[in-house]
Amino acid sequence: MRGDDRQQAGMWSYVPLEQRVPPDHPLRPIRNLVDGVLAELSPEFSQLYARVGRPSIAPEKLLRALLLQVLYSVRSERLLMEQLDYNLLFRWFVGLDMDDPVWDATVFTKNRQRLLAGDIARAFFDRVLAQARERDVLSDEHFTVDGTLIEAWASLKSFQRKDAPPPPPDDPGNPTVNFHGERRSNATHASTTDPEAQLFRKGKGHEAKLYYQGHVLMENRHGLAVDGELTPATGFAERAAAWTMLARIRGTRRVTVGADKAYDTAEFVAGLRRLQVTPHVAQNTSNRSSALDERTTRHAGYRVSQQKRKRIEEIFGWLKTVGLLRKTRHRGTARVGWMFVFGLAVYNLVRIRNLMEQTAC
């Protein structure tokens, strides 16, 4: 018997939002992890807000919404608010009831700036690492370091001379710019829309673009990111950021760090040894002698580090999948760095969830 196609809206819903989400949904263990992290961050949230005035968006809900934006590659805050309006799964994860109004996209963005100023991304990242340490999935002996380029949200047309006023544009929306015959460098030119972005070329045969450089330190046992930095894109930023991150994580015992051939310089290797870190850097013998010799490379641990080193590309691949390594929609080192570190925290959450499922099996 054919059913009727009657469409009469019901006035009430008797199914709780919690029951609409399947018990085995992948977001459920992530939500449990995130709730534990946010509970620990509650005192830090209280310091960012005044005791009087109109209540703002709850920072816990704001961070859960940002986490969804990263996980589902939502390209803008406006589209994220649209999804929150009708997507019941998103409402459940953020903590909104069925009838709660959705925030305006501009208000949401303004509230996020308070978290940016309070360096909440770094605190969130550290608490996620603490969750991994409690579950015994975080090692503290063998690490890998690498860097990647993040394209800035600025056009090459905005890269103009610092000491001369720009000519009036023929088209304010899309001006015609002729760089033919002009030598451009970071010393004499800067972007008018993102002055902190640097003109950089990945290698011979590649075009120069405005970039930032993201750096990740990974532990080798389970492939979790244990630290992250964002710097201007220069030829020495990778090695300097590696020293900074290793100085923060080094404990009482000696640790090892693997890296690719770009790190095989006498200065970098000597700096690691001053930090009591054993360099397991890939040897670069193409144009010169390597900074490492058989005193290091003959050990079996060195060969294991070279095998584990490739796993850090999984982190960069995941960040590229969710859009954080494509052209970012933020400007300035602080804003781009905030989203980069927050993205690493989300990656760790997904990785911890996968490890928990493997353990359960």
Image (spheres, helix red, strand yellow):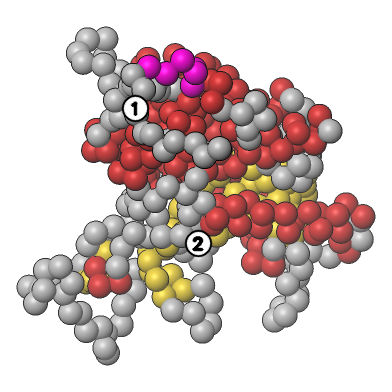
| Secondary structure state at the residue bearing disc 2 | strand
Q: Residues within 10 Å of mark 1 (few under 14, many from 20)?
A: few
As shown in the figure, which amino acid type bears the numbered disc 2?
Answer: Leu
Q: Position of residue 75 (x, y in %)?
A: 39, 51
Q: Residue at 46% x, 60% y: name it.
A: 326
Total marks shown come to 2
Q: Nearer the viewer, residue 50 or 110?
A: 110
86 versus 206 height, above or below: above
256 lies above or below 50: below
Task: Kindly identify the residue that appears in the image at 46 percent across and 15 percent down.
Answer: 14
- The residue to which callout 1 is attached is 9
* Direction from residue 331 to residue 211 in the image, left or right: right
Left or right of 328 on screen, residue 23: right
- Residue 57: x percent and y percent? 31, 23
Identify the mark at residue 277; answer none if there is no mark. Answer: none
* Residue 149 numbered mark, or none: 2
Secondary structure predominantly adopted by residues drawn in magenta? loop
Q: Which residues are magenta?
A: 12-17
State how far apart marks 1 and 2 are (Cα).
51 Å
Residue 36's spot in the image, x, y percent? 57, 19
Q: Write down the quadrant of residue 69 in the picture.
A: top left
Q: Which residue is at the far bottom?
A: 181
Q: Is residue 343 visible?
A: no
Quarter in which the N terminus is drawn? top right
Q: Residue at x 29, y 57 (%)?
A: 194
